[in-house]
Image: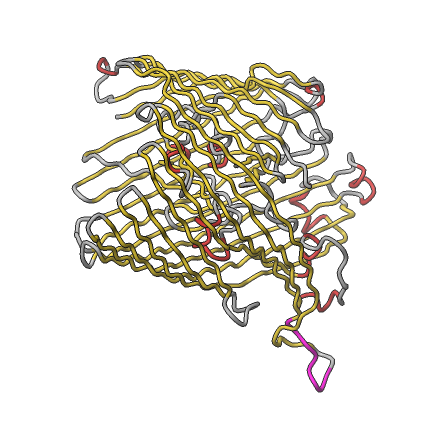
Amino acid sequence: MMKMLTHLTLCLAFAACSVHAAWAGDVVRDTLELSKEFQARPASLIEGKVSGVQVLSSNGSVNGDLFVHIRGLNSVRSDSQPLWIVDGAPTIGMFDLNPYDIESIEVLKDVSATAIYGLKGANGVVLINTKRQKQDGLKVDWHSNAVVSSPFSTINESRTALSHNHSLSLSSVNGQSLFNLSGYWRTDNDVLKRNGNNNGLVNVLYETRANPVVWFSTNTMLSAGGAEEPGYLYEDYDNDTNMWRIFNTSSLSLNFTKTFSFKLNLGVDYKNNTSFVWFGTGTDRGAAANGEACISGMSFIRYHAAPTMSWYRYFGKGRLDLSAGVSANGDYDRTNVMRGTDFFSHELRARGLNIHASKTVIDNHAINYSSYGAYLKGAYSFGETAGLDAMLRLDRTPVFDDAPVLHYAVNAFWKPLDYLKISAGYGVGGVEQMTDYAGFSGFVTGTFPEVDPDLAYYYKGLNRVRTSELNAGARLSLMRGMLNLATKFYSRQTDDAFNAYCFGRKTADSYLWRYSDRTPYFDETSTFGSTGVEFDADATLLNRDNLNWSLGCNLAWNDVAGILGGLTSVLKAGRFVLEAELDGAVLSGMTDFLKLGKLNAGWDIDPSFLPFVRGMRLSLSGRNLLLFCADKDKNPFLSRSVVAGISITL
């Protein structure tokens, strides 16, 4: 059994996730916005909000990678990260959106819900929907926040850090057409010296439904930034990264009749990273090599096209829905690495590698493949009393597959009483990741045959995970919806396979190699299962004219992931909103700690004394105000912070 983080969260902000949506996906909606002033990535906004979802940081710093695990690990070879989809288009991993542009985040956990995504969805799916203004007219929103952080650690490299972020958006609705332009800037400084980042993002959205037959939408996001993450023990070490990214998702809908429609989703995501790593003579590694540097350039492209047809018809109180679609996905990843040692001048550090290093090595890697899929789905529901849906999908990755791979799912629900709903589902889904020979060691648990380095270019590998899952749940809605309880049981079986192939051979008349049909080179498969139970509850404790108090909690147990949970409490008194959060965690083999994680307060001001101002909010937040940890003085990333912000709507 794999041991992971055991996490218990109390009093979470950012609008509690309702258990009403537990059968398709858990939805976190934007209602208060008091959690957005400090969260840079969508993963931070769902942390503790959805049962069975784990959000982990690689090192706790502002530049640390975030890892999202849905119902524990689903692979012993890959990172088990979910599929991220923004406005209908998949992205290259997690996307750093402007948090104020996010309308809702939906998390699909059941394989019976994610199987429709074929070879992309077995680790779970996170659907992000961006905001659309609904009222006619012009609207301007401005948000600014400042964060002051102080360290718990007493090491010399600690400091008091100031961070800030700003968002400005302009939205206009004219009849059935919508235009939105937003900009976001964020500066994060860690409590460790020289550790921080700067990021900017511009988002342009246009949508029109002026024609009742033809609907069109396009959304383009451009982001750029840089990060500095030196080792806090060395002044003579650099790890700097420059990044830029462009993402576009577009959709075209044709409504032939009220019940029959066609929709085409298109998406392109391009990401470029350049990193500069320097080991000076002040480090052991740099001293041994008289300076060592590495410059790596990585570019990633993902494209997606998915046309679908939908039709429905009512039969008395019953409704039949049918849909069919195809999809094409492509990935192209390229990495260029240059390493150098023995520098005769250290003036430019890593940026002087081309001219100052006496010994250099260049290495290139490229991965390029595409996959195709087609599905058919049918659903029949009898009002809100009962329903059944089934889905069948075929997927093929031509480089590796001779025949399509089958995925399927079936779901059913029954509502025998007004306050009781029972559901069940079974699904088989998959996820895959391709690598070149240089990446084999990251996917193989043991050893594998070595090849001639000059021929490694012809060897490719595929990690394919196939997961089957049975789930069953129930929901109770009592006291006219003021108390809602939900539970879900699931049991899954996973086949985690890695297959390596050679795509080259010698020519008959020489020792030269050329591309050929694939031949098996090496394979390894692991099989494991997991079982879990999830529980969600939300209650309205007080609901009067100007006073509302709600409480929500979630708890999940998984024999792979341990125990996860969250408890949410939100108090609204007139124009005043108060939220609080208490975290406790046990890290296997590391330190135990308990902290008062967050205390948010927001005050809506009557803006009648200001011309052209429709709304104003002042917010104040405290993070990690109390921390009980035996080793807190030795952890350089632990810090307490205070956030002050202002939001204005024109």
What is the x, y in percent for residue 203?
A: 37, 41
Quarter of the image for the C terminus: give it: top left
Q: Can you say whether 487 is above or below 443 in the image?
A: above
Q: Looking at the rendering, which quadrant does residue 550 occupy?
A: top left
Q: Can you say whether 14 is above or below 115 in the image?
A: above
Identified at 62% across, 75% down, the residue is 515
Quarter of the image for the N terminus: give it: top right
Q: How many marks?
A: 0
Q: Looking at the rendering, which quadrant does residue 596 occupy?
A: top right
Residue 648 located left or right of residue 98: left
Q: Residue furthest bottom?
A: 509
What is the x, y in percent for residue 32?
A: 37, 24
Q: Nearer the viewer, residue 157 or 601?
A: 601
Residue 91 located left or right of residue 30: right
Q: Nearer the viewer, residue 306 or 333?
A: 306
- Can residue 155 be seen at all in this image of the molecule? no
- In magenta stretch: residue 506: yes
Q: Can you say whether 593 is above or below 496 in the image?
A: above
Q: Nearer the viewer, residue 215 or 480?
A: 480
Identified at 67% across, 70% down, the residue is 520
Q: Can you say whether 228 is above or below 648 in the image?
A: below
- Can residue 123 be seen at all in this image of the molecule? yes
Q: Residue furthest right?
A: 288
Give the residues drawn in magenta, as a range: 503-510
Q: Nearer the viewer, residue 171 or 628?
A: 628
Q: Residue furthest front?
A: 416
What is the x, y in percent for residue 460?
A: 64, 64
- In magenta stretch: residue 280: no
What is the x, y in percent for residue 508?
A: 70, 85
Residue 561 located left or right of residue 109: right
